[in-house]
Amino acid sequence: MHNDGTNTSRLEVAALVERLARQADALDATRRETAEHHQRTVQSVPAALRHALERTLNQVASDATQAVRAGLSQPLADVGAKAAEHQRLMRSSTDAMIHTQRALMASLRKVHWVTGTVFAILLATIAVGGYLIWHYTQVIAQHQVDADLLRAYHQADVRLCGKHLCARVDRTDKRYGDYLPIKRQ
């Protein structure tokens, strides 16, 4: 009955550990995909804006080109600053995810150690318990034989006949009266 509870607990801990490992892997894959997507987006925005700007500048006269450049330089600087800010935020969130993943792995290692220790203690307890049951079964069996012998001795009519132990038996030989010597081994 105790083994069923231990096995159930062990299975629950193993399922929990496996689920945590899968979640950590999924989180890491999502983080990488998001980081790559954001990186591509951040890298493509300035190029796309430059390309659009160049097309526009080629179509507009030189005076208009000067005005457009002056008008777009501040928004491009703002976009670059926002892109840099987003990149910094992505790096900090990536670092936080890595830290969380490491903490999960450390917790997983601790769960493995605790499970192994509990299992080892359980095995030692079962081994010691089995030995004690076997030992005391042997002792009880020997005491049962001794008790049966003493019970039979107390129920028998025995006495010393010289240097021999004699018992009263139902026989016709009357050398010692109703007692006969017990055969030695």
Image (cartoon, rainbow, N blue to C red):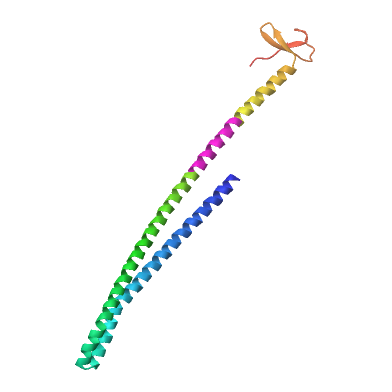
Q: Nearer the viewer, residue 150 or 121?
A: 121
Q: Is residue 130 magenta?
A: yes
Give the residue drawn at x 23%, y 91%.
Answer: 64
Q: Nearer the viewer, residue 35 or 13?
A: 35
* Closer to us: 118 or 126: 118
In percent of width and height, residue 78 lies at 29, 77
Q: How many marks?
A: 0
Q: Is residue 123 left or right of residue 141?
A: left
Q: Identify whether 57 is placed above or below 150.
A: below
Q: Quadrant of the N terminus?
A: top right
Residue 181 pos. (x, y %): 70, 11
Occupied quadrant, residue 23: bottom left
Where residue 174 sits, quadrant-wise, is top right
Seen in the picture, residue 173 relative to 126 is either above or below; the reply is above
Determine the main secondary structure of the stretch shown in magenta. helix
- Which residue occupies 40% across, 53% down? 106
The quarter holding residue 70 reads bottom left
Please tell me which residue is depicted at 26% across the width and 90% down the height of the picture.
56
Question: Residue 121 in the image: x percent, y percent?
Answer: 50, 41
Measuring 34% from the left and 68% from the top, which residue is drawn there?
A: 89
| Residue at far left of view | 62
**Magenta span:** 120-136
Task: Confirm whether the magenta stretch covers residue 84.
Answer: no
Which quadrant does the C terminus fall into? top right
Left or right: where does residue 68 sit relative to residue 128? left
The one nearer the camera, 55 or 147, is: 55
